[in-house]
Structure formats: C-alpha cells, structure tokens
Image (cartoon, rainbow, N blue to C red):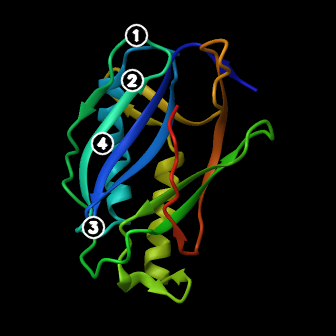
Amino acid sequence: MPTSTSGIYELVLEQTYLGQKILNVFHYLNTLDMDDLQTECGTAFDEDVLDAVADLQVDGLVYDNIRVANLTGTGADIFVTPSIPDGNIAGDDAAGFVAAPFRYNRTTKETRNGAKRFAGVTENVMVDDKFEATYFTTMQATALVLAAQMSTVGGLFDPVILRKPPAAGPTFTYNEVLSVSALNRQTTQSSRKSF
C-alpha cells in the first residue's frame, strides 16, 4: 500500500443548507508529492469538481468556502471562494439529512472503501427510497468527475482514500481510487471527522 510524507491535501467543501452547516471532506495527493499547493488544490476543485457536485444539489444549498489543508506541509490552511454560489437544481428542498451517496472504490483491501454523501437533494428527484432516472444519470456523471484527476496551473491532484495516520509520525497511508460508484438509494448525511 502506498505511503507518503508529502503532497497530501485535505479539502473541505463548507456548505449551508436549511440553517445547518454541511461539510464534505475530500483527500487528494499531488502527483509530484509537492507540499504547500493549497491554493492550487482548491482552485482545481473549484474548476473541475464543484459544478458536477452542484448538479446534484438544490439552489437552497449555499457554498460557503473551499478550505484546503496540506496535511504534510508547513503552509497554513487556505480558503477559496467558490465560483458557484449554490446548487444548480431548482425544486423543493428535501430534509437536511437526506443525501445522495457515492462509494469510492479502493484498489487494494488495505483500507475500506471511501464514501461521500451530498445533502441538498430536492423532493422532486426522490422516488420511494431511490432517485428518478434523470437524477441518477447525473449522479453517475458526477461519479466520473469525483474519480478523475484534478488539474490547474501549478498542480495535478489525484483523489485518494486516506488512512488515519499513526500518532507516532506524519507518514500517511493511502489507497488510490479505482473508481467512484453512484448508489441509487437515499441515505443520510453522516458526520465525518477530519483529523
């Protein structure tokens, strides 16, 4: 299983929905194992990923910040202002805990699969405990974007599944993302803790 002592980034998409804070946490590895490229990582996410996520979310969900920490470097966390103010879907807001689930498929069994759950679903796309066909097609397109390498001037970043580091040192064990699967079922927005 790969390990790294450099080039590991934690990106948090900070959102507000129905008066509640929503956080989606992502981990990326700079392809050259370079540190202190927080701005580049945040910019790449804004340019390459955010619009695909917004296609899943109602316009009542607001994007507050893209916060990026270099877990292996010395630079301070940075905040990138999202270029998109809110979700792209017009419709009736579903409850704040209803989410669209994705599974980050691992390449080896040395970590668990990863997961993302995006809140801000509309009532209009919910059918029983699943999603209607057009919305699920959008979820599948978003899954391809989530699995892809992000790029911007100054940096290339691959999504990774990160294992919590040991208390003894800053070496991170990670699993490369083989693919991302959209799951056609409604789920809840679970609390994920960063470290």
Residue 163: x percent and y percent? 66, 32
Q: Are marks 3 and 1 in contact (CB under 8 Å)?
A: no
Q: Secondary structure at mark 1?
A: loop
Instruction: Tell me the kind of residue under disc 3.
Output: Leu
Name the residue tied to disc 3.
18
Observer-side mark, 2 or 3, equals 3
Instruction: Tell me the kind of residue under disc 4.
Output: Asp
Residue 145: x percent and y percent? 46, 51
In 3D space, how far apart are the residues under numbered discs 2 and 3 (Cα atoms)? 35 Å
Observer-side mark, 3 or 1, equals 3
In 3D space, how far apart are the residues under numbered discs 4 and 2 (Cα atoms)? 13 Å
Name the residue tied to disc 1.
74
- Neighbourhood count class around disc 4 (C-alpha, 10 Å): few under 14, some 14–19, many 20 upward: many
- Neighbourhood count class around disc 3 (C-alpha, 10 Å): few under 14, some 14–19, many 20 upward: some
Name the residue tied to disc 4.
46
Q: Is residue 97 above or below residue 125?
A: above
Residue 141: x percent and y percent? 47, 62
What's the mark number on residue 129? none
Instruction: Tell me the kind of residue under disc 1.
Output: Thr
What's the mark number on residue 155? 2
| Residue found at x 22% / y 59% | 86
Using the rendered view, name the quadrant where residue 153 is placed.
top left
